[in-house]
Image: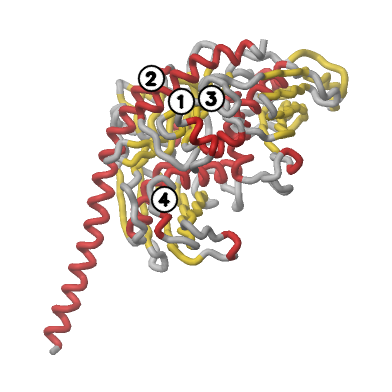
Amino acid sequence: MAKTNDKLIVNGKRLDGRAFGDMRPITMRINAVDNADGSAQVSFGNTEAIVAVYGPRKLFPRFLQENDRGIMRYRYNMAPFSCTDRIRPGSSRRGTEISKTSRLAFEPVAFLNDFPTTVVDVFTEILQADGSTRVTGINAASMAIAVAGVPMRDLVAACSVGKIQGQLIVDLNGIEDNNSEADVAVAMMPTKDRVTLLQMDGVLTKDELFTLLGKARENCMRIYDMQKAAIKNSFKQNQDAEAAVEADNGEMQ
Amino acid sequence: MKTYAYDLLVNDKRIDGRAMDEYRKISIKRGIIHNAEGSAVCTMGSTKIIAGVKMETGTPFADTLDEGNLVVNAEFTPLSSPDFEAGPPGEDATELARIVDRGIRESETVDFKKLCIAPGEKVWMMNVDIHIINHDGDLIDCAFLAAMAALADTKIPKYVDEKIVRGDYQSKLELLHAPVEVTVCKVAEKFLLDPDKAEEDAVEVKLTIAVREDDNICALQKQGAKDVSIDDIKRMVETAIAKSKELRKLLK
């Protein structure tokens, strides 16, 4: 996306009207892919990620299996139509790196030791990109992995923080990301207060970095509450649907 | 993993008797490849990495029509370790290349506008290729020193009649900053720098921190399949800033 020389902050507000500490509107949905063992769709403003989890399932070819633990594979991929310029399908260096760091955001969290010789496959597709795509993907993946029934120490919540035109902000959108002085991606186990992913580009002083980490922590906690609510809600809906079916059956009899 | 190296590290000891925050002996030599526009070899203990810079011309990216490009690529050559196999760059090589790339790019060390030949049409493409010769741990820090030394050695070739005149140079590449990357490792509750391969295998979390000469931080990347607290991150950043001064002297 293009660089701009225009102001990103007008009258103390960001271009989309947000205050520095505001996240964009967030939506979360469980069960976005019927075939998957667990799936979720999350949007932060215009950024939209869909994640499907398959497994734990037997890993083939067999020489890849680990006898004392399961492994995780994580694929971060941008749909060709997700950006203003078409993304050429196939692996990219950026995608390879994000896939690796995202996988490492979950390895400390998922109890893969309970599933020897298996794999948990996490497939993330960015349907629409408007900044902060990797953290949006991680937020969705976290819920999808949980719903797939993989035991976890905690959910993983992630958010981006950064600096634009001298101001420290949270949840960068596309234009802010492309013109930022620094952007930081953070994933955490919120209730354990542990960081599982940390990446930064740009220039920050030590103190700015530490301030941003604090902001990231606050936002991860908020996101965590939303994730928890979305998961609970999805099971409640299932129960309601089942109850409705049972009620129908009762009437028929 | 509970190995010999692990047992030593949790007791604040190193296999080779170093202090926990002590690097192995580092030596850097520039200008070792005459066919490259810039080159350097960096050894850190027995880790050895060559970085070479080749200048090519190409068309600029659509969003930066008046700027040259930087491409960092890393090859984990099979000759450098029994663990590496031939083939296209894997996940680790890609990650290393991108961490080095970010340290150079985000620190604003290179003025890409000066690498423009004809706006919108022709710019210099600076390829920094990182070749691992021997892998004995701490590849990122070593690769970054090699890359920075190679850039400091880089000369821009003459460009006449739309052709590069190899071996004849118009100017040296100007470097505006002096970033270094320091990878701080954590095992159990201990922190260490510059692990050798055996120690690195015991390390649980790593944080690579790119630090500029003004102590600003210009790239971060957490690695390793363990989590870490924000207090630990702060401590690791402080360690990196302190140590960066020592490494930077080696690039002078």
Q: Can residue A133 be seen in this view?
A: no
Chain under label 4? A
Mark 4 and mark 3 residues within 8 Å of each other at the beta carbon: no
Q: How many marks can you see? A: 4
Mark 1 and mark 4 residues within 8 Å of each other at the beta carbon: no
The amino acid pointed to by label 2 is: Glu
Q: Is mark 3 on a helix, strand or loop?
A: strand
Within 10 Å of disc 4 (Cα), the crowding (few <14, some 14-19, many 20+) is many
Mark 1 vs mark 2: which is more N-terminal?
Answer: 1
What separation in Å lies between label 1 and label 3 (alpha carbons)?
A: 26 Å
The amino acid pointed to by label 3 is: Leu
The answer to whether B149 is drawn above or below residue B252 in the figure is below
Q: Which mark is residue B193?
A: 3
| In this rendering, the label closer to the viewer, 1 or 3 | 3
Q: Position of residue A224 (x, y in %)?
A: 28, 44
| In this rendering, the label closer to the viewer, 4 or 3 | 3
The amino acid pointed to by label 4 is: Ala
Q: Which mark is residue A49?
A: 4
What separation in Å lies between label 1 and label 2 (alpha carbons)?
A: 10 Å
Please tell me which residue is depicted at 30% across the width and 31% down the height of the picture. Answer: A18
Mark 1 vs mark 4: which is more N-terminal?
Answer: 4
What separation in Å lies between label 2 and label 4 (alpha carbons)?
A: 29 Å
Q: Mark 1 points at which residue?
A: A182
Chain under label 2? A
The answer to whether B118 is drawn above or below residue B97 in the figure is above
